Amino acid sequence: MTTKIIGHRGASKLAPENTMYAFELAYQLGAEGIETDVQLTKDNVPVLIHDETLKRTTNGTGYVKEFTYEELKQLDAGSWFASEFSDARIISLEEFLVWIKPKDLYLNIELKNNKIDYQDLESIVYESLKSHRLIDRTTISTFSSKSIKRLSKYKNDLEIAYLTSKKKPNLVEYAKDLGANALHIKYRLLNSELMQQAIAQKMPVRIYTVNKYKQMMNCYQLNCNGIFTDVPYKAITFRKVFQFKRNI
């Protein structure tokens, strides 16, 4: 199995995260998937932004949920990163799905509902994916165990990942009991025993956020299903190095 390289919020070391600049750049650089974050606006439009508030990645302030999508579209979502990205904007999930649909890319949508329990976020995102016929190449992930349980009704046709940075005994079984059928973990939780358990349960495991050479090589060695990285161009090069060394 070849470990899939997934752009974490796009190519987020080279362009402002969760903007079309970052997504397009990740695609052009050879990433095999895109990871992005979804919050809900005041008028229930799913939009792509990591933080619950606007301050870090836009020129606005306040919570995403306090604004309509039309209001959020007016914000500058790029100048915080570099002046040449001043025309970057917050985009809707709908816009993103239209962009990604014709491309051969895996998609991971993280529901940002562990701090704010957005009403109906699970069903809104699921229906959007279904309408674009993207269910079969998408994973929905979340840190929220409540959200996993709500999503579990879709698990016969959708991959649902429990996302965690916390060490637990029998993590694979714990995720499965919640209703997840995939596991996305922080790199420090990765070990060969966990991977063996996941393989036995036929549960895909993907690792975040993997930006360093040694971490990437370890993920490749342990046959992780995917890595989320801010530097997909480096991950691709290092995977070639790993494959070369393995074949010597």
Image (spheres, rainbow, N blue to C red):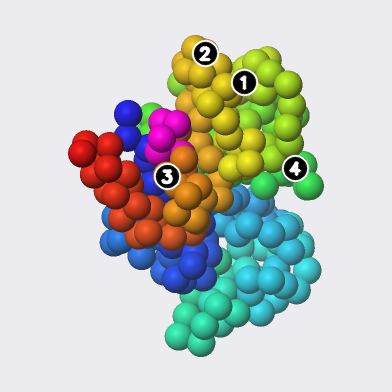
Magenta stretch bounds: 219-223
Distance, label 2 to label 3, CA atoms, is 24 Å
Question: Which numbered circle lies on residue 217?
Answer: 3
Residue picked out by circle 4: 114
Residue picked out by circle 1: 172
Q: Which mark is in front, 1 or 4?
A: 1
* Residue found at the far left of this picture: 248
Q: Which residue is drawn at 69% across and 59% down?
A: 51
Q: Label 4 near label 3: C-beta < 8 Å?
A: no
User: For this rendering, which residue is in front, 158 or 180?
Assistant: 180
Q: What element carries label 1?
A: helix
Of pointers 1 and 3, the one earlier in the residue sequence: 1
Question: Which numbered circle lies on residue 225?
Answer: none
Of pointers 2 and 3, the one earlier in the residue sequence: 2
Residue picked out by circle 2: 201
Q: Residues within 10 Å of mark 3 (few under 14, many from 20)?
A: some
* Residue found at the far top of this picture: 200
Q: Is mark 3 on a helix, strand or loop?
A: helix
Q: Which mark is in front, 1 or 3?
A: 3
Q: Label 1 near label 2: C-beta < 8 Å?
A: yes
Distance, label 2 to label 1, CA atoms, is 8 Å
Q: Which residue is drawn at 56% across and 82% down?
A: 79
Amino acid identity at mark 4: Asn
